[in-house]
């Protein structure tokens, strides 16, 4: 499945949880030797919610939550007859989802929690190796956003002229982020539109990042560069973020089911 082309292998472990998730994810996410995906989303039983959702990145590390992945799991459960409104237990807390359309686009709305935005990050921590962009604006600032998982949001006049991968890899060594951080670059287009590029811990550059889209939109709203709802254009498509600046932020976007398959696990991945 994928959400704005951020793709996942979805596994229901409620009836059989024997496979080693880390080994399985490393194999399954390999685009040449496995199935191919940005991560594995595992559905497990929960005593506090309808289901527990775990997100295992392509490198085997575990993320606290995944905004695109939770939409995919919500669709999977809806099509399995388990309801249009589902609450998931995640490492970032309880996340509620609601199916909003099943037509040409299967869309899901997610309550993502309250974004906590920290002070501006010093310029030296976000040098884009270009000094100034073509508009002469240089470094326009950066923010840290906590959504239950960590995000650095870099504000630029264009997302295309930033060496995001190099910046992100440097920030993984920053002592302020002992567990690493997701890194995004955002360009404000108008009061309702932003463009974003994403780099995710344990994966690298991705076509979309749901929590990252919310983090970027929250920065745009908090800095009065945009007004809710905000259309977020990512490399893999379009997402919509709603936030009143105080309560939960909401993310709405597609959930696409690509194919179903069965695989036989050998001792190396089971």
Image (tube, rainbow, N blue to C red):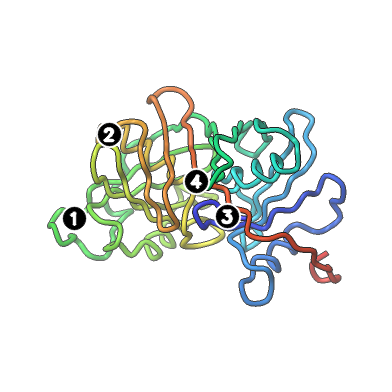
Q: Quickly name the residue at label 2.
A: 223
Sooner in the amino-acid sequence: mark 3 or mark 2:
3
Which mark sits nearer the N-terminus, 2 or 4? 4
Please name which of the two marks, 3 or 1, marks the residue nearer to the observer.
3
Check disc 2 and report its element: helix, strand or loop: loop
Check disc 1: other Cα within 10 Å, few if <14, some if 14-19, many if 20+.
some
The picture places residue 268, in percent across and down from the top left corner, at 81, 71
First reached walking from the N terminus: tag 3 or tag 1: 3
Residue sitting farthest toward the front:
103
According to the picture, the residue beneath numbered tag 4 turns out to be 210
Q: Mark 2 vs mark 4: give the one in front.
A: 4
Residue position for label 1: 138
Residue displayed at 65% across by 30% down = 85
Residue beneath the point at 30% across and 31% down:
227
Q: Is residue 267 above or below residue 53?
A: below
Residues under labels 2 and 4: Cα distance?
20 Å
* Total number of numbered discs in the rendering: 4
Residue position for label 3:
2
Q: Mark 3 against mark 4, which lies toward the viewer?
A: 3
Find the distance from the CA under tag 3 to the CA under tag 1.
35 Å
- Mark 3 element type: strand
Packing grade of label 2 (10 A; few <14, some 14-19, many >=20) is few
């Amino acid at each position: 499945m994928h959400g704005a082309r951020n793709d996942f292998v979805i596994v229901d472990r409620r009836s059989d949880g024997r496979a080693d998730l880390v080994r399985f994810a490393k194999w399954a996410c390999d685009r040449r030797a496995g199935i191919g995906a940005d991560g594995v989303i595992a559905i497990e039983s929960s005593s506090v919610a309808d289901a527990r959702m775990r997100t295992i990145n392509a490198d085997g590390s575990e993320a606290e939550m995944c905004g695109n992945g939770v939409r995919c799991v919500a669709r999977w459960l809806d099509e399995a007859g388990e309801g249009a409104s589902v609450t998931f237990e995640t490492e970032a807390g309880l996340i509620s989802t609601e199916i909003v359309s099943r037509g040409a686009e299967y869309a899901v709305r997610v309550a993502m929690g309250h974004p906590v935005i920290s002070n501006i990050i010093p310029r030296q921590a976000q040098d884009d190796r270009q000094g100034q962009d073509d508009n002469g604006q240089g470094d326009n600032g950066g923010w840290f956003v906590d959504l239950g998982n960590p995000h650095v949001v870099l504000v630029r006049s264009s997302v295309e002229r930033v060496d995001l991968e190099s910046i992100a890899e440097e920030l993984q060594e920053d002592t302020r982020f002992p567990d690493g951080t997701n890194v995004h670059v955002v360009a404000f287009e108008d009061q309702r539109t932003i463009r974003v590029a994403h780099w995710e811990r344990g994966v690298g550059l991705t076509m979309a990042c749901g929590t990252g889209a919310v983090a970027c939109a929250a920065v745009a709203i908090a800095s009065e560069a945009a007004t809710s709802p905000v259309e977020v254009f990512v490399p893999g498509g379009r997402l919509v973020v709603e936030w009143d600046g105080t309560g939960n932020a909401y993310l709405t976007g597609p959930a696409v089911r690509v194919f179903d398959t069965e695989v036989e696990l050998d001792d190396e991945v089971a």
